Amino acid sequence: MKQTEDRQNTEENKKKEQPLDWKKEVLEYVKMIVIAVAIVAVLELFIIVNAVIPSASMEPTIMTGDRIFGWRLAYVTEEIERFDIVIFRYPDDKRTLFIKRVIGLPGDVIDIHGGEVYVNGSETPLEDTFCSVQDQTEEGYLTYPLTVPEGCYFMLGDNRTNSRDSRYWQNTFVEKDDILGKAVFRYWPLSRISVIRED
């Protein structure tokens, strides 16, 4: 019994005396970093889209400096709906990401007059109570009424007097393929962490 204990003690002492294999340690850290980067890359490519809000165009719903996660899979099983807040490639420079609210769906007839938005000949304007300033939707550079082409969407910011959106772009509409995801979660600043509400 004593011999067995002595043998175990000797083996433990040998293990303690063995020098640290720093190359092996570094390799383990590198492997962990590579795995973490790969997971983030997969998430960014297929699951989420990350957006930093640089302007006041979506206030008060989304504030300047907010950081937002968009859900890339949102429209795999459901259709894009009016009033959805989406992250998309800016039609005039597809290297840039924008975030706006969907106002016009494919085939919709959009009219803006008297500071209000009308859809499909309705005599009642859209109930856009989420806007920061009511009754001040400028017409922009467009001639109304206009029809949203198939496979495209008409976008407006919630801060209508301070938003460069479909009313001002050279390429008025956003193609469906350029919509990357639905804005779902604000993760920064910490004081405003919340689910993005569309109403």
Image (cartoon, rainbow, N blue to C red):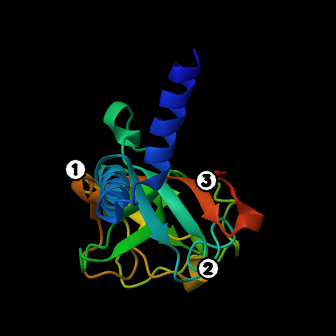
Q: Quadrant of the N terminus?
A: top right
Element at badge 3?
A: loop
Whether residues under marks 1 and 3 lie with C-beta atoms below 8 angstroms apart, the answer is no
Task: Determine whether, in the image, residue 17 is placed left or right of residue 72.
Answer: right
The local secondary structure at tag 2 comes to loop
Examine the rendered structure and indicate whether residue 78 appears above or below residue 120.
Answer: above
Report x, y in % for residue 188: 63, 67
Residue 95 appears in the picture as rendered = yes
Near mark 3 (Cα within 10 A), the count class, few <14, some 14-19 or many ≥20, is few
Mark 2 or 1, closer to the camera: 2
Asked if 11 appears above or below 112 in the picture, the reply is: above
Q: Quadrant of residue 64?
A: bottom right
Query: Where is mark 2, residue-wise?
Result: 64
CA distance separating discs 2 and 1:
32 Å
Q: How many marks?
A: 3
Q: Out of 93 and 167, give the one closest to the viewer.
A: 93
Of mark 1 and mark 3, the one earlier in the sequence is: 3
Seen in the picture, residue 62 relative to 78 is either above or below; the reply is below
Disc 3 marks which residue? 124
